[in-house]
Image: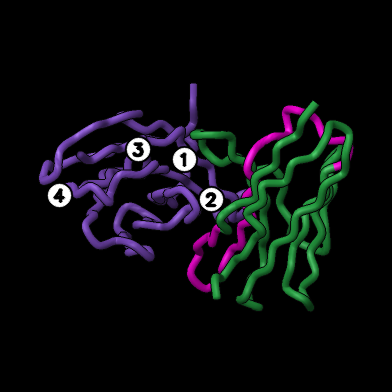
Chain colours: A purple, B green
Amino acid sequence: DADVTQTPRNRITKTGKRIMLECSQTKGHDRMYWYRQDPGLGLRLIYYSFDVKDINKGEISDGYSVSRQAQAKFSLSLESAIPNQTALYFCATSDPGGEAKDTQYFGPGTRLTVL
Amino acid sequence: RKEVEQDPGPFNVPEGATVAFNCTYSNSASQSFFWYRQDCRKEPKLLMSVYSSGNEDGRFTAQLNRASQYISLLIRDSKLSDSATYLCVVYHPNTGKLIFGQGTTLQVKP
């Protein structure tokens, strides 16, 4: 079984709809992250959380919100989706104290299309 | 200036060739460096970590030059299966965040 899972894997929605992307991990890591990837722009950080009570904005948090329901779960919400939020979204986890310190492990991604 | 810069390519090389990618970073406080591999529409996966001056793993060699603030990745004896995008990634100890380059695309041809 995959250590980091994301649901849904693909989603097509309309402008103005509320969307939630979910991420779960079985790695036991405290740190979790949400990124989006657009062609030619690389990965950009949306939000990150260093533990259940910690939420931080990344470089492109406008239009997004997150919830850290438990150590293993980190959800990303688009309250009112717009077409320029069409992208590939990745969740990641890391353990700064582990042997592979600072390494991030990614989920398989969610491809979101906003029409 | 971007914090992490890579030549996007694409690099088109024949099987068996040696190819090198360079990456520059702007924050001199960066301590940890990584190369990730990303196949089309898939998640990035760690290829190599670079914590000191360099690292070698089979056909892959990563080198770090802190004075010039660049990291390189050398791939020897290229295989068709090496075709992918290679992401240069830098860790910022003050923020605990990774900064990603936009990636360099490699296409190995028979």
Mark 4 to mark 2 CA distance (whole Å): 30 Å
Q: Which residue is mark 3?
A: A23
Q: Which residue is mark 2?
A: A95
Residue A100 visible in this rendered orientation of the protein: no
- Whether residues under marks 1 and 4 lie with C-beta atoms below 8 angstroms apart, the answer is no
Marked residue chain, label 2: A
Marks 3 and 2 belong to one chain: yes
Looking at the picture, how far across and down is residue B110, in whole percent?
80, 26
Q: Amino acid at mark 1?
A: Gly
Circle 1 SS class: loop
Mark 3 to mark 1 CA distance (whole Å): 13 Å
Q: Quadrant of the N terminus of chain B?
A: bottom right
Marked residue chain, label 3: A
Q: Which residue is mark 4?
A: A79
Looking at the picture, how far across and down is residue A73, in whole percent?
33, 40
> First in sequence: mark 1 or mark 4?
1
Q: Amino acid at mark 2?
A: Asp
Q: Please provide the residue range marked out in magenta.
A: B76-100
Mark 3 to mark 2 CA distance (whole Å): 16 Å
Q: Residue furthest left?
A: A16
Marks 3 and 1 belong to one chain: yes
For image coordinates 35% across by 29% down, the residue present is: A9
Marks 2 and 1 belong to one chain: yes
> First in sequence: mark 3 or mark 2?
3
Marked residue chain, label 1: A
Q: Looking at the picture, does residue B56 appear above or below residue A45?
A: above
